[in-house]
Image (cartoon, grey):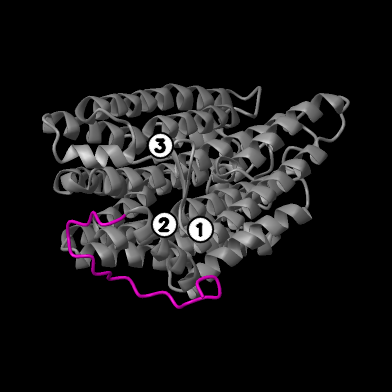
Amino acid sequence: MPTNLLTLLPEIILTVTGVLVMLAEPMIAPGKSRKPLGWLAILGTLASGLAAFYQLQLVNASGPISGFYATIQVDAFSVFFHLLISSIVLVTLLASLDYFEGPVSHAGEYFALACFGATGMMFMTCSVELLMVFIGLEISSISTYILAGFRKGQATASESSLKYFLLGSFATAFFLYGIALCFGATGSTSIGAIAASLGTTATPALALLAIAMVVIGLGFKVSAAPFHVWTPDVYQGAPAPVVGMMSTAPKAAAFAVLLRFLFNAAPMYRNHWIVLIEILAVLSMTIGNLGALMQRDVKRLLAYSSIAHAGYLLVAFTSIQQDAVAAACFYTAAYAAMNVGAFLVITQLSGYDEQARTIDDFTGMALKRPGLSALLGFFLLSLIGIPFTGGFFGKFYAFSGAIHNGHVVLAIIGLANSGVACFYYLRLLAALYARPVREDATLLSPRKLAIPAGIAIAASAVATLALGIMPNHVLNLVQRATPETLPAFSVAPAVSTLPPAAPTEMTR
């Protein structure tokens, strides 16, 4: 197979899958189940994950692979995000098979859009040319705009989609303007060429403005404050499984781009952009947690929680280069596992019509759905950062790296915000195990837990637990990815403060 096609093999598989789903959907008679289309999308997503694993074997054997005139680079860094995105989409599709069964006649479009969205996200993570990143960003964004309003006929869904589209377009304009300024300052939009030219540019002020514009544009995508205003309304109106996917996979892709851009293209301006990152981190943690304290709607509460977690992840960017990438990648994986799991449980408890929306609606849920309530409680404990969960090690690596690099105050603010977050997470957890005032206070999902949805939730729980008790396997991959992807641009001495990962069969 030509090298060019190998570099985009997972994306090609997902694109073909999405097209096949769209072609097959009109062949199914109206009123018939669209579940076979979901299984087709699941098989395509699984195949894309296997293709990413095949790419990893090639990278291990011969080093990074470049293609399409050096605009695409496949290395351990991009493969990690390919595997992460395909896993998120896979469990989301499994949980969605029965969610859209019955009341929805256009479920086939949902499965196709999920594949196309994942294609754009993967494209972002392996692109080393900013215009190619922009194309991937648009593919991903258009798919999620539509998915946010997928529950047609509901005013909140239309509001969610419209707000997401308008503010997302606004963010894209910032990002595109930043790309234009990068070209004006360096004469190129390639990350490698930008890195070579920024140090000698005759317009350093223009270069700094370009970096700020790119960070602001990506800040919208990751829900970092003060660019977070769309998040609560969009999460509230979008279908629960869609929220689980778009709160993790697009953010993972955006953080991958941010890591590449800041540490590859602009290391010489680290002392400048790190101030902007610190401001965004503090605002995100504080506004996210304080906003969540006032929420009674569970999806809005988790929306503000996602803003806070974006701040925790930004704290990792203040570490030295190697630690920053390793900690950010690990935190992204841990947050994806626990947040997707929480939303998948909420999907099963509240159903398509989302009868259980507020904390009061979840009161006493453990009395009628003990298994799902226990899993939701476990995911909430991981979001807090309790030991033996992925959330604990995610915060540990982010805060310890910041402390070792001299950002002690920032780490203290993060720890204080983690304490504040305990209140609203534990309030929801306590409601699950409280006795309802009225016998009919807790509304149940109209259907029993389907086997595919059970597998998806169990996989999320196992991943969350595994990252909490065996973090070395993921940490090994991301630590190996750092020097290959982000070479020799450290401002501080490259002395890692994260624990070395134990060797595995993959690295031997």
Q: Where in the figure is residue 282, as x and y percent of width and height?
A: 24, 49
How far, Cα to Cα, is label 2 from label 1?
18 Å
Relative placement, left or right, of 145 versus 152 is left
Q: Where in the figure is residue 395, as x and y percent of width and height?
A: 36, 63
Task: Give whichever of discs 1 and 3 has the lower sequence position.
Answer: 1
On the question of residue 430 being in view, the answer is: no
Instruction: Give the residue number, with chain letter if any, for mark 3.
Output: 221
Relative placement, left or right, of 275 versus 327 is left
**Which residue is more in the foreground, 377 or 311?**
311
Q: Which residues are magenta?
A: 487-508
Q: Contact (CB < 8 A) between labels 1 and 3? A: no
Q: Secondary structure at mark 3?
A: helix
Q: Residue at x 26, y 57 (%)?
A: 488
- Residue 59: which disc? 1
**Which residue is more in the foreground, 398 or 52?**
52
In the rendered image, the quadrant that contains the N terminus is top right
Task: Give whichever of discs 2 and 3 has the lower sequence position.
Answer: 3
Q: In the image, is residue 506 part of the stretch drawn in magenta? A: yes
286 relative to 176, above or below = below
Local packing at callout 2 (Cα closer than 10 Å; few below 14, some 14-19, many 20+) is many
Q: In the image, is residue 348 part of the stretch drawn in magenta? A: no
Q: Secondary structure at mark 1?
A: helix
Q: Where in the figure is residue 393, as x and y percent of width and height?
A: 40, 68
Foreground label between 1 and 3:
1
How far, Cα to Cα, is label 2 from label 3?
17 Å
Q: Secondary structure at mark 2?
A: helix
Relative placement, left or right, of 361 versus 34 is left
Q: Amino acid at mark 1?
A: Val
Q: In which quarter of the view is residue 332 placed?
A: bottom left
Instruction: Give the residue number, with chain letter if any, for mark 2.
Output: 329
Q: Amino acid at mark 2?
A: Cys
